[in-house]
């Protein structure tokens, strides 16, 4: 396996010809155009109220700087997936391997983002399922993540079969500065798909 962080080293096949965005690995180093597109996507998420680490207003130049630093500092095994619609990035999700030497099997999922105009069409679910498969291919056995309690992301993760592990009160702030609780989830990738389906 190559030691450079990408979307899993294999370009994803284009979506079937239904007009749905195509999900693929982000080639690194990212182009300037892709960084700008990712920055616009992150700014859109913050402005729409998503709990993704930042407070509004969050200008595109600050978002692009964050992406530049994040991509440059990524672990070699990190995976970045993007969804493109007519060439434009409208969604993304990341996988970051655990840093601890005694957790080589674990990774964290972060920054599931879908542009407002592309929501409510199943793209978030498609990105998560694609990342789950890439994680299996990369040899990870356990995935973890957190989300705002009561939000759309929590409902998505429950629907996808992630296991609820607990709640942390007052964990972070919404983009408008309002405190929120976080819910923690994990996904055991060693389960067979059939077993996971039976438990849902």
Image (tube, rainbow, N blue to C red):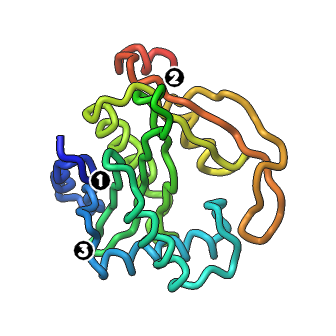
Residue to which mark 2 is pinned:
200
Residue to which mark 1 is pinned:
5
Whole-percent x, y for residue 32 in the image: 30, 81
Marks 1 and 3, how far apart at CA = 22 Å
Relative to 103, say whether 45 is above or below: below
Camera-side residue of 156 and 55: 55
Q: Which mark is residue 87?
A: 3
**Residues tagged 1 and 2 counted as in contact (Cβ below 8 A):** no
| Badge 1 or badge 3: first in the primary sequence | 1
Picture quadrant where residue 82 is located: bottom left
Residue placed at 43% from the left, 21% from the top?
Answer: 197
Marks 2 and 3, how far apart at CA = 35 Å
Foreground tag (2 vs 3): 3
Marks 1 and 2, how far apart at CA = 32 Å
Whole-percent x, y for residue 158 in the image: 58, 34
Residue placed at 45% from the left, 52% from the top?
Answer: 124
Residue placed at 34% from the left, 36% from the top?
Answer: 135
Whole-percent x, y for residue 61 in the image: 51, 85
Relative to 116, say whether 194 is above or below: above
- Quadrant of the rendering where the N terminus is positioned: top left
The residue tagged with tag 3: helix, strand or loop? Answer: loop
Question: How dense is the environment of label 2, judged by Cα within 10 Å: few (below 14), some, or many (20 and up)?
Answer: few
| Badge 2 or badge 3: first in the primary sequence | 3
Question: How dense is the environment of label 1, judged by Cα within 10 Å: few (below 14), some, or many (20 and up)?
Answer: many
The residue tagged with tag 2: helix, strand or loop? Answer: loop
């Amino acid at each position: 396996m190559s030691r450079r962080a990408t979307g899993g080293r294999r370009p994803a096949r284009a979506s079937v010809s239904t007009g749905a965005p195509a999900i693929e690995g982000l080639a690194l180093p990212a182009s300037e155009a892709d960084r700008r597109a990712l920055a616009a996507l992150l700014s859109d998420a913050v402005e729409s109220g998503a709990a993704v680490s930042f407070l509004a207003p969050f200008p595109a130049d600050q978002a692009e700087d964050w992406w530049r630093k994040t991509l440059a500092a990524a672990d070699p095994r990190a995976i970045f997936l993007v969804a493109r619609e007519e060439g434009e990035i409208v969604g993304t999700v990341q996988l970051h391997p655990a840093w601890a030497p005694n957790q080589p099997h674990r990774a964290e999922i972060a920054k599931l983002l879908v542009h407002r105009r592309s929501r409510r069409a199943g793209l978030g679910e498609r990105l998560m399922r694609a990342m789950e498969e890439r994680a299996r291919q990369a040899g990870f056995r356990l995935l973890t993540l957190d989300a705002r309690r009561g939000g759309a992301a929590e409902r998505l993760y429950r629907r996808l079969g992630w296991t609820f592990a607990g709640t942390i009160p007052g964990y972070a702030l919404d983009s408008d500065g309002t405190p929120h609780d976080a819910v923690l989830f994990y996904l055991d990738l060693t389960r067979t798909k059939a077993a996971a389906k039976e438990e849902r």
